[in-house]
Image (cartoon, coloured by chain):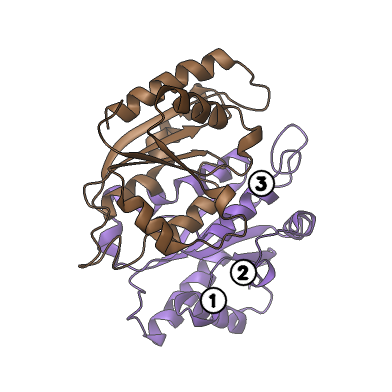
Chain colours: A brown, B purple
Amino acid sequence: MSTKKTIIVVAHPNLKNSKANKGWLDNLSKFDSNIKIHNLYDLYPDYKINVENEQKLLEQYDNIIYQFPIYWFNCPSLLKEWFDKVYTYGWAYGSNGKKLVNKNIGFAVSLGAPINFYQNENSLDKILKPFIASCGFVQANFKGIHAIYDVGVEFNDTSIIVDSSKQYLEFINKM
Amino acid sequence: MSTKKTIIVVAHPNLKNSKANKGWLDNLSKFDSNIKIHNLYDLYPDYKINVENEQKLLEQYDNIIYQFPIYWFNCPSLLKEWFDKVYTYGWAYGSNGKKLVNKNIGFAVSLGAPINFYQNENSLDKILKPFIASCGFVQANFKGIHAIYDVGVEFNDTSIIVDSSKQYLEFINKM
């Protein structure tokens, strides 16, 4: 179990019917009940983010993981809205905005296509550039990407999700 | 005036109070009244996209420009929601989804920080990777990026916007 406090900010528009994203969370809860799971689409179906609540919540954690399925090489829209509203001047950046400095930030993402599709020009560190650059801007520590590939509509292999969840936990424990 | 039909899909959460984005559109309308301006935040304040209408609209144009301010190295959330809903399987991709093949797609973006900030690791072709990769996925022709830098809250130089609008029109005419 990690000695650092971890929150997973989850952004999946249809989490209960997802395979990888729901599977990950179900397994993580079994392995380590101390990880806080924060589900944005449950909280903000109308896209009206409670900024103060979100900021106060994040401030309590050492590790922040953004977990989402990658659609069109990018995050689901609610997570982008969340960044635009929560990462405010005077909180996340600016001379008086230091709340994310030295926080550890990681990403856990699911991808519909096989791993071969995400090589070279489409590598994850390139696709996720907006998010990695944002870590730098707020002076957080970018701690890498935990990914699962080839989990499109046809996918249905529980054992792969369990294995991936164990790797996810190792990823968190190293943050 | 371009001989090709052009639509500008605009995504700015506060367009009427914007400087660069509104200035561009005002000037373009003076220079070339034939360019269709399609303002997403006016149409969909509740994020409920009319997918069929959007698809039928796009199909009528040769050139599609996505215009937006870059926030956190990425587009505003409503444009991301729009991509996820409008770029459907069977329309934008898949064996029967060819509606964007060979369309010309360009980007017009405003950036708050000076141009020096967006060099090397933060260059626009890197920041906009999710959008450029999406062009490739739907087999559209990526036609480049028209950008204006250093248009943060303090900016208020109308002559720079007029010059940038003329370059924007040249950008469109070359698409």
Q: Residues within 10 Å of mark 2 (few under 14, many from 20)?
A: some
Mark 3, secondary structure of its residue: loop
Q: Residue at x 31, y 25 (%)?
A: A1
Q: Are marks 1 and 2 on the same chain?
A: yes
Residue underneath mark 2: B41
Mark 1, secondary structure of its residue: helix
Left or right: where does residue B103 sit relative to residue A7? right
Amino acid type, callout 1: Leu
Q: Chain of mark 2?
A: B
Q: Residue at x 51, y 61 (%)?
A: A49
Amino acid type, callout 2: Tyr
Where residue B155 appears, as percent x and y from the top left, is 34, 81
Where residue A132 appears, as percent x and y from the top left, is 34, 45
Where residue A28 appears, as percent x and y from the top left, is 45, 26
Alpha carbon distance from label 1 to label 3: 30 Å
Relative height, residue B49 to residue A7 (above, below):
below
Residue underneath mark 1: B15
Position of the C terminus of chain A by quadrant: top left
- Labelled pair 1, 2 in contact (Cβ < 8 Å): yes
Relative height, residue B84 to residue B171 (above, below):
above
Q: Residue at x 61, y 53 (%)?
A: B81
Relative height, residue A138 to residue A23 (above, below):
below
Residue B157 falls in which quadrant of the image?
Answer: bottom left
Q: Mark on residue B102?
A: 3
Amino acid type, callout 3: Asn
Front position among marks 1 and 3: 1
